Image (cartoon, rainbow, N blue to C red):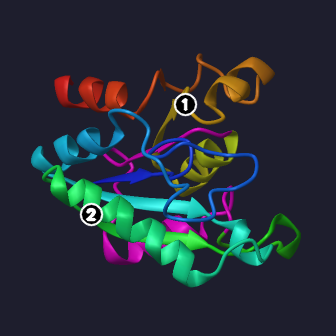
Amino acid sequence: MTVIVLDRDGVINTDSDEYVKSADEWQPIPGSINAIAELCEAGYTVTVATNQSGLGRGLFGLDALEAMHSKMRDLVEDAGGVITMIAFCPHTPQDQCACRKPGIGLLQSIHAEFPLDPDTTWMVGDTDKDIQAATRMGIRSALVETGKGETMLASGRVSRETTPVFANLAQFTQWLLAS
């Protein structure tokens, strides 16, 4: 089983500097839901690793997070796919926990259930923290320009020379399935 790890905000759904706090605010990026379904249809196990500091900041509760994740899973299932596991970090950066990306705690949780293979597992993210977590875990990484991706490239925090870059999750999926 080949595992794909996706960041959530900015990769699957639109991101917000004000945080995505409810299922109503959670809106998929065009093409992302079908891309996940295509990965599943091709035999990939799709998982999600997401920092959710809005919980630790008190901006929303676990019920709201579960509603967002239920909406995401339902949309993916309606498209013919499945998100096999969602690992999330509820902490703020000040908590200095092991699970918050760029730490590898979320990836270790996924690895405990679905082994991450350094040769075949990809983590797709929109920030340098996603790329750093993947590197520290020893898996492949790709950046999407949606979410904060363009800002990461413009700032030099992620380089096209060292990280494959795609316009969005749909383009990454097309590339991977054609490889």
Find the magenta span and give its range. Answer: 100-127
Residue 91, image x and y in percent? 74, 74
- Residue 68 visible within the image: yes
Residue 71, image x and y in percent? 37, 64
Q: What residue type is labelled 2?
A: Asp
Q: How crowded is mark 2: few (under 14 residues within 10 Å), some or many (20 or more)?
A: some
Residue that badge 1 annotates: 146
2 or 1: mark nearer the eye: 2
- Any magenta on residue 176? no
Q: Is residue 170 above or below residue 74?
A: above
Residue that badge 2 annotates: 74
- Residue 2 visible within the image: no
- 89 lies left or right of 113: right
Question: Residue 102 versus residue 19: which sits nearer the camera?
Answer: 19
Which residue is at 65% across, 40% downward?
A: 127
Q: What residue type is labelled 1?
A: Thr
- Find numbered disc 1 in the image and state the secondary structure of the residue it sits on: loop
Q: How far apart are marks 2 and 1 (CA)?
A: 22 Å
Residue 24, image x and y in percent? 50, 59
Q: In this view, does 77 lie above or below 110?
A: above
Task: Give the mark nearer the N terminus: 2 vs 1.
Answer: 2
